[in-house]
Image: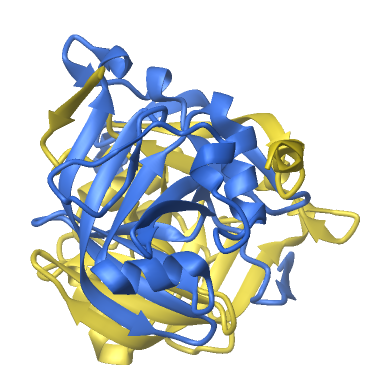
Chain colours: A yellow, B blue
Amino acid sequence: MSKILIDPQTLIYPMPAVLVGANVDDKPNFMAVAWCGIANGEPPMISVAIRHRRYTNRGIRQNMTFSVNVPSTDMARETDYCGIVSGSKANKAEVCRFRVFYGKLDNAPLIEQCPVNLGCKVVHVLDLGSHSLFVGRIEETHITESCLTDGKPDVNKIKPLIYTTEPARQYQAFGEVIAPAFSIGKELKAGE
Amino acid sequence: MSKILIDPQTLIYPMPAVLVGANVDDKPNFMAVAWCGIANGEPPMISVAIRHRRYTNRGIRQNMTFSVNVPSTDMARETDYCGIVSGSKANKAEVCRFRVFYGKLDNAPLIEQCPVNLGCKVVHVLDLGSHSLFVGRIEETHITESCLTDGKPDVNKIKPLIYTTEPARQYQAFGEVIAPAFSIGKELKAGE
């Protein structure tokens, strides 16, 4: 067999690049996160993994809320900056000129320039090895009006980023459509 | 402000498309999952959200192991099929002609045709609303040798899939490289 074993620390798995927001000591802060995923359907929940010592980790625990802001491809520079610098050393929202707003959750800061914004209330915290896994219930979803087509969100206008690690750490755009989901697989049903 | 509120049930967030494997009643079964994410760094852990009643959910609980297999763009049909059909009704591995192998974990089935295979041991189970969130420690990572470049995993050869829901449910490829990570953001440091 043509398989080889590699170090499990090498995470080769499709990962989103998002900006997780929290108020830390009552001030909005954002960090770049690639380690998150949907955790539940009804009600909708999302998980984010954040290193224990990170400034954002402190803010999430202070308010038990956080936000997930989906940046578009034209925000790669700001996204990356928010992953490099700690909020303990710089006012990242100011440096990136983020227009911060609040929704229903009055302490989960949202970024107006990001096309999609989720406001989340923490429902579970798992303290794993190096990271805390925060599971948040999505209480509100905001979208920039110009990213809708016929009233529906449109990924071609949202233009999210994927974070790739191998062979190089970089941000990638979404690419070509390969196939319709819940559809192309039906071809195999004939062979059952 | 040009933001509008939409139903939080609309999950507009970059999602991977992977095949989660488990032995159910000692037989290998696979389902398509878009709701997963890295949960911890050291040791590496991954989370998968699976509806309580799903056949795969039963298998994971039987062995407390599961696998995450990353399909490439040429496996969209098989991936989709594994999301449409229940393992209680069809032998999906057989229909898809998956060559199943086992690694260190002798009850976490892996798919040879998928370029990347993670074998995971369950360390936490959160029973959320509609789904169980399984957090697994990645015990082993296999990669197809032809997906390496100079001995390193290469995303351009792995060709993972993203699952998109809006405006249509479809699978997309990874697209163009937007910027180098841990690098482009440095430009903003000057403005701090």
Q: Residue furthest top?
A: B150
- Above or below A48: residue A167: above
Quarter of the figure that contains the C terminus of chain A: top right
Report x, y in % for residue A45.
49, 77
Residue A26 is left or right of residue A14, and the answer is left
Residue nearer the viewer, B189 or B55: B55
Report x, y in % for residue A132.
20, 73
Residue beneath the point at 34% across and 67% down: B60
Residue beneath the point at 32% across and 47% down: B109
Residue beneath the point at 49% across and 62% down: A69
Residue beneath the point at 51% across and 87% down: B129
Report x, y in % for residue A10.
18, 38
Residue nearer the viewer, B169 or A192: A192
Which picture quadrant has residue A91?
bottom left
Report x, y in % for residue B13.
55, 57
How many marks overall? 0
- Above or below A116: residue A41: below
Residue B69 is left or right of residue B98, and the answer is left
Q: In this view of the protein, can residue A21 be seen by the observer?
A: no
Quarter of the figure that contains the N terminus of chain A: top left
